[in-house]
């Protein structure tokens, strides 16, 4: 059985506040374990990894051709 992680430990691992963690849980962004209704909430390492994967975005390459000047008109 996988080790269960408390809310405080999960927030520290993710580098976010407990309030942000609770918001993610309430919005269905992160999986959690709760044995009884209104009981303690736990997380698994796999659930945290899945959340990190969802929140990871690829870096976009810088577009060096962008300029704020208008192109010069061709003179003939």
Image (tube, grey):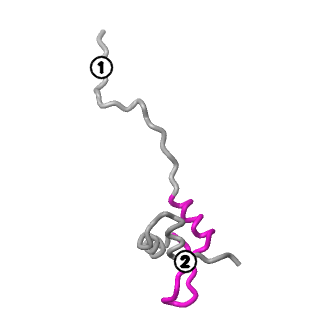
Q: Is residue 35 magenta?
A: yes
**For residue 11, which numbered disc appears in the image?**
none
Residue 10 in the image, given as x and y percentages of width and height: 53, 71
* Element at label 1: loop
Residue ID for mark 1: 72
Q: Is residue 10 left or right of residue 70?
A: right
From the top left corner, tell me how far across and down residue 9 is, in percent.
54, 72
Residue 41 lies within the magenta run: yes
Hey, which quadrant is residue 32 in on the image?
bottom right
Report which residue position mark 2 lands on. 6
Which is closer to the viewer, label 2 or label 1? 2
Q: Which residues are magenta?
A: 30-55
In this view, which residue lies farthest toward the right? 1
Q: Earlier in the sequence, mark 2 or mark 1?
A: 2
Q: Identify the residue at image location x=58%, y=75%.
A: 5
Q: Please provide percent x and percent y for residue 49.
A: 59, 64
Residue 2 vs residue 41: left or right?
right
Horizontal side, residue 11 vs residue 67: left or right: right
Residue furthest top as drawn: 76
Real-space CA distance between mark 2 and mark 1, rounded to the nearest whole angstrom: 62 Å
Q: Residues within 10 Å of mark 1 (few under 14, many from 20)?
A: few
């Amino acid at each position: 059985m996988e080790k269960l992680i408390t809310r405080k430990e999960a927030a520290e691992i993710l580098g976010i506040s407990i309030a942000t963690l609770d918001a993610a849980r309430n919005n269905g962004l992160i999986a959690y374990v709760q044995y009884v209704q209104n009981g303690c909430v736990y997380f698994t390492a796999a659930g945290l990894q899945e959340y990190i994967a969802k929140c990871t975005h690829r870096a976009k390459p810088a577009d060096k051709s962008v300029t704020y000047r208008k192109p010069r008109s061709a003179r003939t």
